[in-house]
Image: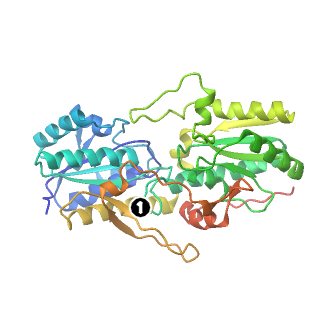
Amino acid sequence: MFKNKNILIAQGGGPTNVINMSLVSILEQEKKLGSNVIGSLNGVNGIINNRFTNLNKVSSSDLKLIAQTPGAALGSTRDKPDAKYCFEILEVLKKKKIDKFYYIGGNDSSDSLRIISEYAKDSNFNLQCIHIPKTIDNDLVSNDHTPGFGSAAKYVAQLFSGINYDVKSLPGVYIGVVMGRHAGFLTAASSLLRKTKSDGPHLIYIPEVSFSFDKLLSDIKKCYSKYGRVIVAVSEGIQDDKKKLISQTIKKKSEFDAHGNIQLSGTGSLGDYLSDKIKINLKLSRVRADTLGYPQRSFLGSTSEVDQREAYNIGNFAVKSSNKVNFSFSAGMKERVNLNNNYKIEFKINTLTDVAGKTKVMTKEYYDLKASNITKKFINYAYPLIGKKLIDTKSLI
């Protein structure tokens, strides 16, 4: 078994509303075990630059506040370790005599941890690496869902519910561009608070289904004729039938992050482009587009109590599991078999190779291709995750 002596915690990738719940739960459990716990500032980048903080000194009152705060409390990074980078990490960890390394992150972060774990083994360094899942995209394989998704889904669902009443008041076409590079779960969440068949979003487009401008225009024309208004939810990662990102086709120059991913956030170009297409081709004057951006993963008012609880509990599970097994792993959530029963989630151990660098996408049973919308099965899957603290609504029109 690995000793509980010197513990390192770091956070990587895009932050979420509940990422610090996992941080705090790990820290609290390890402190109870008498461990010396340090945090790396800005993920693996902080390790090679020797930027650490003593987490044992953080007070209980501060931990309570940190747990409910969005953003990565230790700072994050998009760095992806290669062989040289991993060697530098291991040299630092050896000097620090680290026995256990918890890395809270998504699929890119889990892949980084896999590489570090393998190089540690190759160099005969006794290090247990534990991945704690988090991502608003909900795209980690071998997991029912991931901490961070529930709160982001709640934000998206509430935003589109509010937009629904706004566009009812002043009819037109509204396009909301939602985060999601390869997986459409978050975009699909825009449908979770619809009350009637006439409520928006009327059309939803996800990366898993080839995007066609002709179909978009045809869909909008039909919906506008039927309802006198149209609300569209579209993923930032939509792509054509040749798997080329629509965002990439409209940008003169694409930017890439350290993982080789095309930078999709930080611009409203996709929404503006779709808006102009609709105005010109359908001769509609009132067409508006928004890119939802960072509030999806940081808005305080959208934190799901279910998401908070699960993010905290998976941290506890990881600590307890790490003391029962003598290998590195990724903490996970067991997939639900029956979505119609009372909601309950259980945790499990995944190997790092099970999760690392892989992407989960929406299944066909969650999307109605003909209607360009979401099925009831997806609603049953995702609705419990946003929690019960919701504002009820009513309109006279």
Looking at the picture, tell me which residue is in the foreground, 120 or 96.
Answer: 120
User: Where on the picture, by quarter, is residue 364?
Assistant: bottom right
* Residue 51 visible: no
Label 1 CA crowd tier, 10 Å (few <14, some 14–19, many 20+): many
In this picture, residue 9 sits left or right of residue 208: left
The answer to whether 143 is drawn above or below residue 114 in the figure is below
Q: Which residue is mark 1?
A: 142
* Residue 364 visible: yes
* Type of the residue with mark 1: Ser
- Which residue is the extreme one toward the top? 252
The N terminus: image quadrant: bottom left
User: Where on the picture, by quarter, is residue 91?
Assistant: top left
Q: Residue at x 36, y 39 (%)?
A: 76
Secondary structure, mark 1, is: loop
In this picture, residue 140 sits left or right of residue 244: left
| Residue 330, x across and y down, in percent | 32, 57
Looking at the picture, tell me which residue is in the foreground, 123 or 312.
Answer: 123
| Residue 48, x across and y down, in percent | 22, 33
| Residue 200, x across and y down, in percent | 75, 53
| Residue 72, x across and y down, in percent | 39, 43
The answer to whether 395 is drawn above or below residue 76 in the figure is below
Q: How is the image coloured?
A: rainbow
- Which residue is the extreme one toward the bottom? 341
- Which residue is the extreme one toward the front? 242
In this picture, residue 59 sits left or right of residue 375: left
Looking at the picture, tell me which residue is in the foreground, 103 or 236.
Answer: 236
The C terminus: image quadrant: bottom right
How many numbered marks, from 0 up?
1
